[in-house]
Image (cartoon, rainbow, N blue to C red):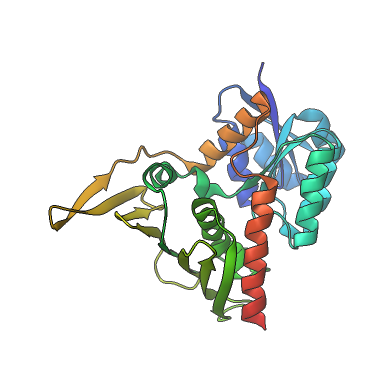
Amino acid sequence: MSLRAGVAGSGSMGRNHARCYSLLGEVELTAVYDADLERAKAVADEFGAEAVDSLEALAEACDLASVAVPTVAHLEVGGDLMKRGVHVLMEKPIAPSVEEAKELVTLAAEHDRILQIGHIERFNPVMRELEAKLNRPKFIESHRLSPFPNRSIDIGVVLDLMIHDLEIILHLVKSPVASIDAVGVPVLTKSEDIANARLRFENGCVANVTASRISPERMRKIRVFQDDGYLSLDYQEQTGEMYWKEGGAIQQAKVEVEKDEPLKLELAAFAESVREGKTPAVTGQQGADALAIALEITRQIGG
């Protein structure tokens, strides 16, 4: 029996969620909701679903739903859907504040609903290589650069882009953060458009994270160093290289990555969690933890 999937929000992200649901086996895209019914109808018609004019109607039409509305509405929309019995995949960041993030996590537990957070890079095929080849990272360096997007300008680059890498680094290091030093500069918006943060963890690992949305080029790369070598991966190209010392020389090998679309893999994993009743790959609490670090970085930049 197919799971019924819905999407709340019919902007560019919501449309992509609808498109990927329509590609999955054992999942049927049934409904799209947006405060602008005409926008919802355009997306629904494109992918063979029904446009609905309320969250109540969306909940009645689906078992699980992606919430791709502005972050300030995550609690209202995602909370309402979970109260109505729908499993929710919440686009990142989970919420605009730690308090609202905690409320969403609590609602999911109270209503026994799966709450997965859309940290999409966790589903990039290169992540499998990171997880398979790492045991004790000592130093991590990540760069996420893009031209100005003309979207998400209500938030700074830390909550827009850097939070992807913060969540991945927390996942890889698995140690509490001991200290943070951050700097950022607003260039085209009122919030920071370029930022750098240095995170020191209690286990001694250090991470240097840079994000920019005013770069002439696109880059999404991470390098992870440990005692026996280091791994360099490109999320964008889904390629990588491994370096290690052997026989008195530095050896190098390409990392074989089976390429695929991260969003499709993310939604497939979400549907599998719902179908099997298992913990999602990125839980609400993990999304809340990444948000807390991101907000501390923005506080330091703004202070």
Q: Look at 59% across and 36% down and name the residue there.
A: 267
Tell me which corner region of the image, top left, top right, bottom left or bottom right, holds residue 61: top right
In front of the other: 269 or 293? 293
User: Looking at the rendering, in which quadrant would you find the N terminus?
Assistant: top right
Percent across and percent down for residue 198 are 50, 72
Q: Look at 61% across and 49% down and name the residue there.
A: 13
Q: Look at 39% across and 41% down and name the residue there.
A: 132
Q: Is residue 256 left or right of residue 84?
A: left
Percent across and percent down for residue 138 are 41, 61
Percent across and percent down for residue 29 are 66, 30
- Residue most toward the bottom? 303
Tell me which corner region of the image, top left, top right, bottom left or bottom right, holds residue 139: bottom left
Percent across and percent down for residue 191 are 64, 76
- Residue most toward the top? 1
In front of the other: 277 or 62? 277
User: Quick check: can you spot residue 53?
Assistant: no
